[in-house]
Image (spheres, rainbow, N blue to C red):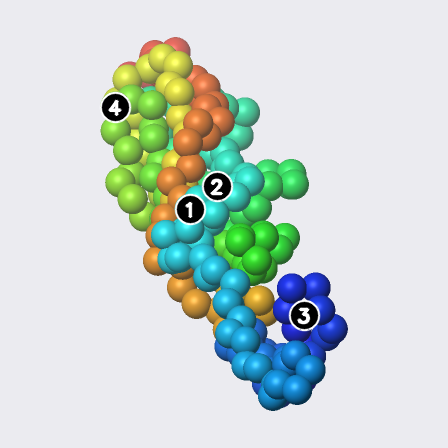
């Protein structure tokens, strides 16, 4: 049962289950008058737009790009492998649930999921948006082969989505995307190779 107090008066039973606010409560009338039914205004409910904004403003982690061969060096003409690596910091990342967020008088929980990634190879080309987190040789499916030598600024962009629930209710799709910004950039050195004949026989 739920009880309410009207104008700081005595607590009264609302005769409703506690899963939601009562719409009205009966209070004693003045001497010689019957009890009165007083409407109770329900607390304001957050809009979907407010919930989506709260999701996009969560303290997310930012992925970095993992490169193979290791050591941030590769060779011109050699297939190079990439993967999205999430740091072990306190930020939210795919698979995690946020701390409860207070929105108006409601408690909102968010569950984070990755929507897609885009790998920037630093030479003017990208992978385009993909759901792949990449990987290492030989099974990694995000690769690039450089045609020119030099330093390349490489990174991975991420877009996150997920689910939310209100006051511990059922999980629902959030239907919005948090497009992370300013992901860390790594410098990859692309080296050239030369061949020469050292000996020969007739």
Q: Assess whether mark 4 and mark 1 are in contact (beta carbons under 8 angstroms).
A: no
Query: Which residue is drawn at the image coordinates 45% and 19% (left, top)?
Result: 187
Residue 177 visible = yes
Q: Which x, y percent locates residue 143?
A: 35, 39
Q: What's the distance in space between the residues labelled 1 and 2, CA to CA?
A: 6 Å
Q: Nearer the viewer, mark 2 or mark 3?
A: 3
Q: Earlier in the sequence, mark 4 or mark 2?
A: 2
User: Of residues 85 and 92, which is closer to you in this image?
Assistant: 92
Q: What's the distance in space between the residues labelled 4 and 2, CA to CA?
A: 30 Å
Query: Which residue is drawn at the image coordinates 42% and 51% (left, top)?
Result: 50
Q: Earlier in the sequence, mark 3 or mark 1?
A: 3
Query: Which residue is drawn at the image coordinates 71% and 69% (left, top)?
Result: 9
Q: Earlier in the sequence, mark 1 or mark 4?
A: 1
Q: Which residue is farthest front?
A: 32
Q: Earlier in the sequence, mark 4 or mark 3?
A: 3
Disc 1 designates what residue? 53
Q: Is residue 5 left or right of residue 85?
A: right
Q: How many marks?
A: 4
Disc 3 designates what residue? 5
Q: Earlier in the sequence, mark 2 or mark 3?
A: 3
Residue 13 visible = no
Label 3: element kind: strand
- Number of the label disc, if any, that sits on residue 124: 4
Q: What's the distance in space between the residues labelled 1 and 4, CA to CA?
A: 32 Å
Label 1: element kind: helix
Q: Is residue 162 above or below residue 138?
A: below
Disc 2 designates what residue? 57
- Number of the label disc, if any, that sits on residue 196: none
Q: Assess whether mark 2 and mark 1 are in contact (beta carbons under 8 angstroms).
A: yes
């Amino acid at each position: 049962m739920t009880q309410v107090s009207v104008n700081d008066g005595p607590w009264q039973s609302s005769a409703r289950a506690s899963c939601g606010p009562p719409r009205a409560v009966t209070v004693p009338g003045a001497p010689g008058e019957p009890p009165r039914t007083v409407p109770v205004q329900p607390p304001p409910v957050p809009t979907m737009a407010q919930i989506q904004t709260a999701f996009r403003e969560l303290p997310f982690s930012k992925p970095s790009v993992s490169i193979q061969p290791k050591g941030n060096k590769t060779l011109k003409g050699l297939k190079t492998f990439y993967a999205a690596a999430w740091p072990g910091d306190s930020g939210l990342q795919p698979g995690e649930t946020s701390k409860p967020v207070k929105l108006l008088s409601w408690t909102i929980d968010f569950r984070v999921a990755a929507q897609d990634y885009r790998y920037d190879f630093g030479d003017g080309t990208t992978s385009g948006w993909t759901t792949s987190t990449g990987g290492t040789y030989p099974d990694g499916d995000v690769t690039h082969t450089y045609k020119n030598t030099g330093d390349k600024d490489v990174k991975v962009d991420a877009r996150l989505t997920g689910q939310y629930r209100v006051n511990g209710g059922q999980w629902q799709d959030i239907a919005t995307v948090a497009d992370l910004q300013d992901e860390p950039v790594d410098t990859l050195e692309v080296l050239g190779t030369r061949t020469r004949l050292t000996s020969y026989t007739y």
